[in-house]
Image (cartoon, rainbow, N blue to C red):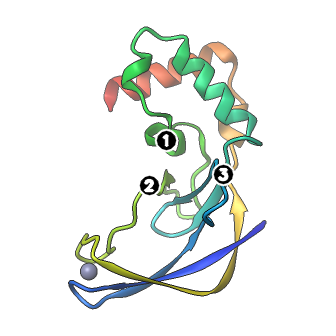
Amino acid sequence: MKKFINAKYDCLSCGHSFQMPMVGDFSYGEFILSSANEYRYLNAFENSTFQEVINIIESQPNKNQVDIQEIFGKLVCDLDSFGCSFSIINCVNCVICNSNNLKLSHDGFVWVEPVSHLNWDKLQLKEKNQKYLDFINQA
Ligand SMILES: [Zn+2]
């Protein structure tokens, strides 16, 4: 578990308020993932699976068309306790009206669990490559 800023967003378009963990300004390589139900964090420098996925991407001819931040959560991360997949949060939009016209304030801190890859880690390298290819071909 790691402590993150609890960011509070007030939507200036529809008035909805919501909160989610946020990485600080000096935390390069850290990401928050969201499943709509739960949050996880990823430190891309400390997470060996992140480098493993980079290696798989780099080994493929279409490597320039694939953004690891787009695929990482759904491809390799375990599902949340409701069976939903995680995605890396790149930009925050209102969960109700999808507006990005948000007022940000800080509201204390929140503890977040790291992402896990238990199901991915059960696979052999060949199966991981195949899962990757199946994933990007359907995306
Ligand atoms: Zn809104």
Q: Helix or strand or loop: what does disc 3 sit on?
A: strand
Q: Nearer the viewer, residue 96 or 130?
A: 96
Q: Which numbered disc, 1 or 2, marks the residue that appears first in the sequence?
A: 1
Q: Tell me residue 34's x, y (percent).
A: 51, 61
Residue at 70% over, 19% down: 124
Residue at 62% over, 48% down: 78
Label 1–label 2 contact, CB within 8 A:
yes
Within-10-Å neighbours for mark 3: few <14, some 14–19, many 20+: many
Q: Helix or strand or loop: what does disc 2 sit on?
A: loop
Q: Tell me residue 136's x, y (percent).
A: 39, 26
Quarter assignment of residue 9? bottom left
Q: Helix or strand or loop: what does disc 1 sit on?
A: helix
Q: Which numbered disc, 1 or 3, marks the residue that appears first in the sequence?
A: 3
User: Mark 1 = which residue?
Assistant: 69
**Image: 96 above or below 120:** below
Residue at 48% over, 11% down: 60
Residue at 48% over, 57% down: 84
Q: Amino acid at mark 1?
A: Gln
